[in-house]
Amino acid sequence: MGNVLLQLNHVHQAYGSQAVIQDLSLTLQQGQIGCLLGPSGCGKTTALRCIAGFEPVSDGEILLNGVCVSNPKVLVPPERRRIGMVFQDYALFPHLDVAANIGFGLHQLTKNEREQRVEELLHVVHLATVAKKYPHELSGGQQQRVALARALAPKPELLLLDEPFSNLDVSLRERLSMEVREILKHQKITAILVTHDQAEAFAIADEIGVMSHGAMQQWDTAFNLYHRPANRFVADFIGQGAFITGKVRNSRQIEIELGVIDGEIPFRCAAGDIVEVLLRPDDIIHDDASPLQAIIISKTFRGAEILYTLRLAGGAWILALVPSHHNHQVGEKIGIRLETHHLVVFPQPIL
């Protein structure tokens, strides 16, 4: 693992009396891609602007390569932070062709050095054939890659991407997010992305921070956010699933309508306590031979799979992902069995 490139320690930011970021801490290693993920208004873009130097912090500190660039008394300007930025709308210059857009921030280089760097990046982002075209002649995906190349051109220490795929359609978004990850990894660039789109975050980032109301709920890998959510908000926000009531049998077992689940219970409880267990669609297996039956309430066809919403005999509902050749009708009963590898459990909320 590389050195720590970016560190936020207990950062607060407020507009007047309105707190936007509260006690935000994270660490990003050199060469890692991080992501701030959360719903609109959760403070993720403000956090990015604080890292870039566009916004001051009211408390805490931001360090780049171990050097403080922001605290309540220090604000190193954006141009002195060696940070590249890709904006949501790309902010390309319409009167400049692709090559000139990419080379725009390279005035400190000689003409020859500038041309070499532009040439190199045109190949990195696979745009060598459109170097002389203008932004309006490009597709959305091509414009996105020009913006990326322009941000990479001055060899920033850190790249910031603010909802970079939000103007693109879903299929292009998925393909481009994987392409961008490949480019950043190949160029050994440390980056942090802001998005509200989980698929995008999962496709591109090594570490993801789920934010809500200006606070970091969990900074972790996609796998852990999905299978080991730190709290109810993360469990609800990441992926799909349904909460089902369970009864604690002992320190490692919980009984639910579908059977007994084994695993570590992350909070203190006693036998007989009522808890809530999160079941993901991949925890429920379609099995015609199973005595357990559930009624199909609704279905969503997803190509290779169908997502069924099922009602259990006790009235609770769950989700199941089933290969799409098992095409059952709404109202039908199907056999199911439980196959969980991770126990995700929370105390029953106090109403």
Image (cartoon, grey):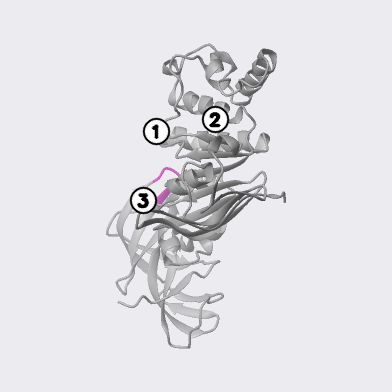
Classify 273 as above or below 185.
below
Q: Is residue 305 magenta?
A: yes
- Frontmost of labels 1 and 3 is 3
- Frontmost of labels 2 and 1 is 2
Q: Amino acid at mark 1?
A: Asn
Residue 287 visible (yes or no):
no
Q: Magenta stretch?
A: 302-306
Label 1 SS: loop
- The disc placed on residue 113 is none
Q: Which residue is mark 2?
A: 148
Q: Amino acid at mark 2?
A: Leu
Q: CA distance from mark 1 to mark 3?
A: 19 Å
Please provide percent x and percent y for residue 116.
68, 17
Mark earlier in primary sequence (2, 1) = 2
Q: Which residue is mark 3?
A: 41
Q: Which residue is mark 1?
A: 167
Classify 270 as above or below 38.
below
- Residue at (62% x, 19% y) in the render: 118
Q: CA distance from mark 2 to mark 1?
A: 15 Å
Displayed quadrant of residue 113: top right
Label 2 SS: helix
Please provide percent x and percent y for residue 155.
65, 31
Q: CA distance from mark 2 to mark 3?
A: 25 Å
Q: Residues within 10 Å of mark 1 (few under 14, many from 20)?
A: some
- Residue at (45% x, 61% y) in the render: 234
Please provide percent x and percent y for residue 85.
52, 35
